[in-house]
Image (cartoon, rainbow, N blue to C red):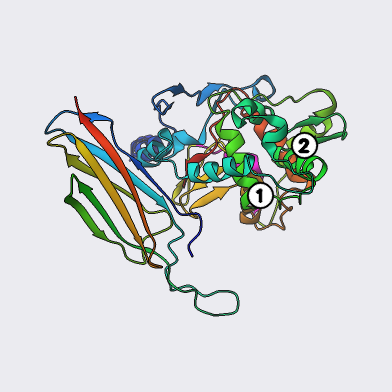
Amino acid sequence: MNIKAMTAVAVVLLAPTFAYADADDDTMVLNEDISMVTKTAAPAHLSDALDEVMSGWHFRSDETQAMQLDDFDNPGMIFVEKGMETWAKVDGSEGKSCQSCHDDIDSMAGVKATYPKWNEAAGEVRTLQMQMNDCRENQMGAKAWGYDKGAAINMEAALSSVSRGMPVNVATDGPAQSTWEMGKELYYARTGQLELSCANCHEDSYGLMIRADHLSQGQINGFPTYRLKNAKLNGVHSRFKGCVRDTRAETYKPGSKEFVALEMYVASRGNGLSVEGPSVRN
Amino acid sequence: MASGVKPRVKVPKTAAAGEAITIKTLISHKMESGQRKDKEGNKIPRSIINRFTVEFNGESVIDATLEPAISTNPYIQFEAIVPEAGEFKFTWYDDDGDVYDQSKKIAIG
């Protein structure tokens, strides 16, 4: 028997496995109303690495996908409701709520799509949660929320929910560029005993299986994400922490400047995809 | 006792007579199983929704017993055939004696 024939057999055997793990071609229409962009051409800065960027939604089973299509079925919306209640609730020494300055939460449509972004007055790149806490401390006289903790995640989800369907549009140039480049470096830096970078799994190997799970592109347009495995909303930084931990490394802390930079870079990899948060994932 | 409990239901506004419609219900509830312990090792007392009922024009449609293994924010979906216009009444019974209910009218059309 020659080797060629053996290879042919192997290819036939392997083909269905890979096809199964690959992203599907379903289309996402939210609440039978909003058409979502879940696949689009990769942004220019990514053109060397990827042709197309895809939402993690495509890598999930039909049942999980369906949960996200209807707000009643999406368990993340319970937390959005809580966030919306907080939006209107007065807190802190100044007797203000978010609504006192910002009006209805619907007026914040599009905000989530551009974060993390450069804040000129503060001279730093800020995530949405950092900006929320700045408002709480300096405008409302209230206590800052813990990073990725309940109240902050609920509010982030509420703000994200009103931007759903709008394209992620994180600026990578201007004063934020150095932070963006730091994030890029972190993305490609191998960490831990397993010596894995984000790119090893999410750029080189998406579509394959990692043990019993599908590897997605690691897009964060769907965050905060309701994960079925822990039945709550999960923040981007917490997810980063989980991934870095899984490479058997000491992790950075949620809210650290490293994760802020990484969030900025990873968000920019999804420029053009629709904001999905709160999404539903495994 | 239980905080943040909020029942929600989704019923179509209209249905054809005899048509099977899908009804979705969800109640936000922590569903504490009674099996867990807190940091000090004390048992956290059970606090769940133990019964869920649905009536249509006074007639029982569903009467479910919920057990501690059911997770947070129980979601119950079922199909019902609507013979006539009327009102669905949904009731959740909490361990602490609280009763939450919601009603939804449905028209034939």
**Residue A184 shown left or right of residue B39 in the figure:** right
Which label was assigned to residue A126?
A: 2
Badge 2 vs badge 1, beta-carbon distance below 8 Å:
no
Amino acid type, mark 1? Asp
Up-down: is A171 above or below A74? Answer: above
Q: From the image, which quarter does the N terminus of chain A lie in? A: top left
Quadrant in the rendering for residue B52: bottom left
Q: What stretch is highlighted in magenta?
A: A194-206
* Subunit bearing disc 2: A
**Residue A117 shown left or right of residue A60 in the figure:** right
> Who comes first in sequence, dot 2 or dot 1?
2
- Judging by the rendered image, the residue that carries numbered circle 1 is A148
Query: Residue B51: x and y, percent?
Result: 29, 61
Magenta span: helix, strand or loop, mainly?
loop
- Identity of the residue drawn at 58% across and 48% down: A234
Q: Is residue A62 magenta?
A: no
